[in-house]
Amino acid sequence: MIPALMATVFIGGYTDNGGRKIGLISPIIGGIVQIYLLLCTEIFHLPIWFILIGGFLEGLSGGIAMFLMAAFSYISDKTSRSQRSLRIIILEMVIGCSSTISFLLSGYMIQTIGFLGTTLVLHVIVVLDLCVVFMMPESLPANEHAKFWTLKHFKNSINVYTTDDTSGKRRLALLTSLLILFFLIPARLGTDSVQILFMLNRPLCWDSAFIGYFKGLYYLTSTIGSILLTKLAQPKFGDLQLLIVGCISAVLHLVFWAFVKTSLMMFLVPLLGIFCSLPIGMLRAFSSKIVSPHELGAMFSWIASMEQIGVLVGNVGFTAIYTATLLWHNGFVFIAIAICYFCGGVVAV
């Protein structure tokens, strides 16, 4: 993780001068290298540490953190301030849905065509991704004098959050955004493990099929609700107001989730959480409108890095809370997650 985060911050600063596409190409190439090492390990029965080498090399390429940084920077370059919030929410939803689909299909594919076949399919998809990126136009023309191997890129990334404008409000707004993310990212992205554990155990005792149905409904409702509300309400109320609405929706559905006893109650959870996907997307949009176009890569690199750390912290922390409170109240962990959303909403106010 550490090599990936350092690479993301470094190249995030570089993309503000050298163009965005390198931030998309680098992690894809790193993924292809890892896939080749996986295939070699499987076919030639190589030692397991070959897979670790692949993971390290993918980390040096930036991994998913760098791809997120470049993708959101690219979409911000291509959109006006009035369109940006909706486009960022749509991109958020596409990423979330694709993650859910891959989660649901991977196990089935491994059982059906084996690990080798699944890896080959993944290789084809990643190569197609690389071809698409090469065909995409550059969203930010490269500065011909931009140098790659210089520590100035780290400095530029840090300066985004340390320099201020003439009004004296920019730095406070950006640092406040990071504080809100500190609460929201673990609550939103680091809870998959406890959600699945809750559904597997009593009182629901669901199998993988029911969990898949629920996950599909959960992302479908939050996708439709978030896109519609952003389209209809964002031009009038603004990003931070929709962020607060999303936090309220998240708190309500999590508190309800904590006391679920039947399958019917469980399938009502997504309806209460219909806007729960809004907060992080609205915060991305809000932050992107504060910085200049030549600071977007640096700014999004910090957000992407916080996401990767937040996923790890959330999964470890909330799983520990679930385990510790299982015998007392198996839904208490969702109260803890709701508190994170509540704190993020309060800071946004």
Image: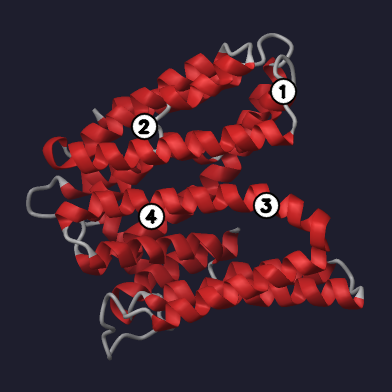
Q: Label 2 is placed on what type of residue?
A: Phe
Question: Going by the picture, which residue comes out furthest to the top?
Answer: 328
10 Å crowding of disc 1: few (<14), some (14-19), many (20+): some
Q: Nearer the viewer, residue 161 or 319?
A: 319
Q: Is residue 16 visible?
A: yes
10 Å crowding of disc 4: few (<14), some (14-19), many (20+): some
- Residue 348 lies left or right of residue 13; in this view the side is left
Q: Secondary structure at mark 4?
A: helix
Q: Alpha-carbon distance for marks 3 and 1? A: 28 Å
Q: Which residue is mark 3?
A: 105
Please provide percent x and percent y for residue 247: 36, 28
Q: Please report the residue visible at 39 percent of the width from the left and 77 percent of the height from the top.
A: 21
Please provide percent x and percent y for residue 349: 23, 27
Mark 1 or 2, nearer chain start:
2
Q: Which residue is mark 2?
A: 275
Q: Secondary structure at mark 1?
A: helix
- Residue 200 lies left or right of residue 29; in this view the side is right
Q: Are marks 3 and 2 in contact (CB under 8 Å)?
A: no
Quarter of image, res 136: bottom left
Foreground mark, 1 or 2, reads 2
Q: Please report the residue visible at 32 percent of the width from the left and 67 percent of the height from the top.
A: 74
Q: Nearer the viewer, residue 47 or 114?
A: 114
Q: Alpha-carbon distance for marks 4 and 3? A: 21 Å
Q: Which residue is mark 1?
A: 323
Mark 3 or 1, nearer chain start:
3
Q: Alpha-carbon distance for marks 4 and 1? A: 34 Å
